[in-house]
Image (cartoon, grey):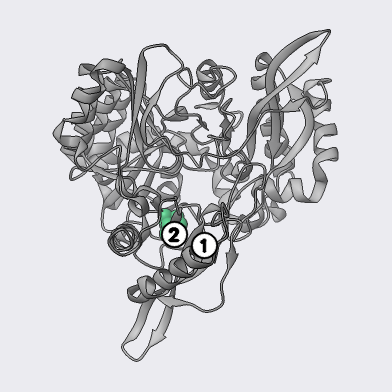
Amino acid sequence: MSYTPIWAQNKEKLNKTELIKLEKDGLDVIEDIYRYAKTGFESITPDDMDRFKWAGVYQQRPKDGCFMMRVRVPSGNLTSEQARTLASIAHDYGRDLIDITTRQAIQFHWLRIENLPDIFERLAAVGLSSFEACGDCPRTIVGNPLAGLDPYELIDTTPLVKQLSDTFLMNRDFSNLPRKYKISISSNIYNAGHAEINDLAFTPATKVIAGKEIIGFHVWVGGGLSSRPYLAQQLDVFVRPEEVVKVAVGVTTIFRDYGYREKRHHARLKFLVADWGAEKFLAKLKELVGELETRGEDKIKGWNAGYFTGIHKQRQEGLSYVGLSVPVGRMSAQELEELAHLADEYGNGSLRTCNSQNIIITGIPDERVEELLQEKVLERLTPYPKNFTAFAVSCTGNEFCNLAIVETKERMRQLAEYLDEHVELDEPIRMHMVGCPNSCGQRQIADIGFQGALVKTEDGMKDAFDIFLGGTLGPNAKFNEKLKGRVLGEQLHRVVLPLLAYYKEEKRNKESFFDF
Ligand code: SF4
């Protein structure tokens, strides 16, 4: 007798996507892509096109035969060899364009169906994959890009990131979840993994057990953005490093079996957690994984917003890392190729992508840092960026994204440049721009968030933005709040400029933009 999963026992309660997923697992499409690469774009069925997400591939806008692809970079940890492979793929198939996403992944554009098998194989040859970078499954594990080198982490999470990735990647027990599912793990005391906006997050904690201080993690569940954002709730639990995978499997099992599958927009884990509450959720988790220690001492001291720009000492004596600014996360294949070369020439052959859309070169002997700073590619990708460009984040927008309402990336870049020319402020103002409420650019956590919409004008429909102020994560976590009114894209600078001038004049000593 064939097994019917719990959630499939009442098909009338399933949305259309659920029925498509029951018919064929999303991961099965990977094999089909090899076939479609021979039979051509026109031969792809609509249902399979939807399943392409499990291969990390979406149709790009306009839907005329080109795809975008996301490549998983767990915790942002890349070798120079992997970076070179990514650069070569962008060069050969992706019109030289590379984007770093807010989940430390690498995104390509302009790919064609016939290119995909070769890309999959090139990625696999260097231990990378685009599989399950999208789709209703566990996505890239995000975390501290400086894991293993970080003076501000309690333990190196690199092995745990690998264990989590190995546990979930291509695991058919978890390839059909109700919706996308995001895991974060970091032992950095400045919340480098953006814990509160993930479905499941592990943050640094300690607990004295049998007279001995153990370093481990606190566990958060049910965070997520989009149009109904939720901050994750902390469970009353302390998890030892060796229990992380067990707990992650338990939480993911709860989501798989009890998560909502009736309406797509009400399917993320956050809705189940909001309905159940942390206590009921933890009771169910313990049923699955056994007893766990109660909460210990929280070690999160603040929030670095994923920024590591500049030159800083590593935990290892005599070594530094150089955090480079990548304006709105976009660079060329040639730039990434050059960074890979510099990582080998000056560093330990390692690059790290950040959820702030920037990149780090690690393992540089202190005495070679000055020499590295003279390299030409660091003129644009500089460790000393101008203030607004340094802290500007943007999603893909309508250049490539089918869900986008407005253009974002170039607009965010230009706005930041304009502010750099016209505003003198010696503190960071984090600006995030998104092209629709899905919020891939995480506008809710920005000091100033811009969310795209359209408005009717005498000259027809025009790009416009809702503006939100005052978002942050860490100990004072809260989402930003909407200002009244909507501003035309071409007028944004006219509103942001006086806003910043007012802040500069009126703020009291030591008051930050968030406090204001
Ligand atoms: Fe596309 Fe919207 Fe995500 Fe931007 S936020 S990349 S427009 S889905």
| Residue 335: % across, % down | 20, 36
> Closest to the observer: 446 or 58?
446
Q: Quadrant of the N terminus?
A: top right
Residue at point 21%, 30% (across, down): 373
C-alpha distance separating marks 1 and 2: 7 Å
Residue found at x 45% / y 56%: 432
For the C terminus, give its image quadrant.
bottom right
State the mark number for residue 437: 1
In this rendering, the label closer to the viewer, 1 or 2: 2
- Disc 1, disc 2: CB below 8 Å? yes
Residue furthest out toward the bottom:
458
Q: Tell me if the residue at label 2 has its CB under 8 Å from ligand 1.
A: yes
Taking the view exactly as shown, the residue that stands out farthest to the top is 211
Name the residue beneath numbered marker 2.
434
Res. 5 visible in picture: no
Residue type at numbered disc 2: Val
Task: Please name the residue shown 65% across and 16% down the image.
Answer: 241
